Image (cartoon, rainbow, N blue to C red):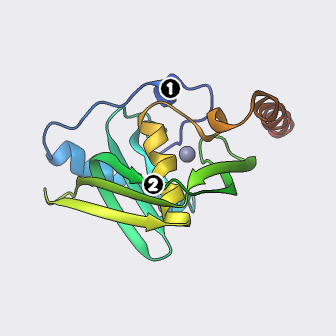
């Protein structure tokens, strides 16, 4: 399963809610988990594999979650700046401000409502994947100057590897 990269339209579209957990949704989740594991990612959102649905998967420090129709219900006022990258913008990273604590509520594949509270890396991954469902990327959170230099570096690397 190929990961969509910067410039792909699906990454910029707000994802649609999942109506029912059926075989199609189960198959999408399976593909997302496989793709995340193969890419060594801490998380993945469905738009990253070209599917505009509200599904995220997370794999951070032993915490593994599949969340359908996730909603960010709380973020701490306290923020921290940590370097962050994205499987859809490979090869570059930048310091991004994120809340140090985040609470997300969503539905599991079994149809149960769960509430996941994360700190540090897990909180960051939750916020990062939720951004994807809104059509946003981590680089949107950078200053215009920083974003320009990050994209310049990204394009330079792409040209070199092309
Ligand atoms: Zn990402």
Does 71 sit left or right of 147 as displayed? left
Image position of 35 with respect to 7: above or below:
below
Residue 120 point in image, percent of width and height: 55, 66
Helix, strand or loop for disc 1? helix
Residue 21, given in percent of the width and then of the height, sits at: 15, 47
User: Which numbered marker is on residue 126?
Assistant: 2
Kindly identify the residue that appears in the image at 29 percent across and 30 percent down.
16
**Pointer 2 local density, CA inside 10 Å: few below 14, some 14–19, many at least 20:** many
- In the rendered image, which residue does mark 1 sit on? 12
In the image: residue 154, left or right of residue 126:
right
In this rendering, the answer to whether 135 lies above or below 100 is above
Q: Which type of secondary structure does the marked residue at label 2 adopt?
A: helix
Q: Quadrant of residue 160?
A: top right
Label of residue 154 in the image: none
In the picture, measured across the screen, residue 35 lies left or right of residue 23, that is right
Query: CA–CA distance between discs 1 and 2?
Result: 18 Å
Decide: is 63 above or below 83.
below
Marks counted in the figure total: 2
Identify the image quadrant of the C terminus.
top right
Determine if the C-beta at disc 2 is less than 8 A from ligand 1. Answer: no
Figure quadrant, ligand 1? top right
User: Would you place residue 90 above or below residue 122 in this image?
Assistant: above
Q: Which of marks 1 and 2 is nearer the N terminus?
A: 1
Task: Please indicate whether residue 106 sits to the left or right of residue 119 in the image.
Answer: left
Observer-side mark, 1 or 2, equals 2
Viewer-proximal residue, 99 or 34?
A: 99
**Residue 33 position in % (x across, y down):** 40, 58
């Amino acid at each position: 399963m190929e990961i969509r990269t910067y410039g792909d339209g699906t990454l910029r579209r707000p994802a649609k809610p999942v109506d029912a957990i059926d075989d199609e949704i189960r198959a999408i989740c399976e593909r997302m988990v496989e793709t995340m594991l193969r890419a060594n990612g801490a998380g993945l959102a469905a738009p990253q594999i070209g599917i505009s649905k509200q599904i995220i998967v997370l794999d951070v420090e032993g915490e593994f979650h599949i969340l359908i129709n996730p909603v960010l219900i709380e973020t701490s006022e306290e923020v921290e700046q940590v370097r962050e990258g994205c499987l859809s913008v490979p090869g570059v990273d930048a310091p991004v401000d994120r809340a140090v604590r985040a609470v997300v509520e969503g539905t599991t594949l079994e149809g149960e409502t769960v509430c996941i509270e994360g700190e540090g890396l897990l909180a960051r991954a939750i916020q990062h994947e939720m951004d994807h469902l809104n059509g946003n990327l981590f680089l949107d959170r950078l200053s215009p100057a920083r974003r320009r230099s990050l994209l310049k570096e990204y394009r330079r690397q792409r040209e070199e590897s092309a």
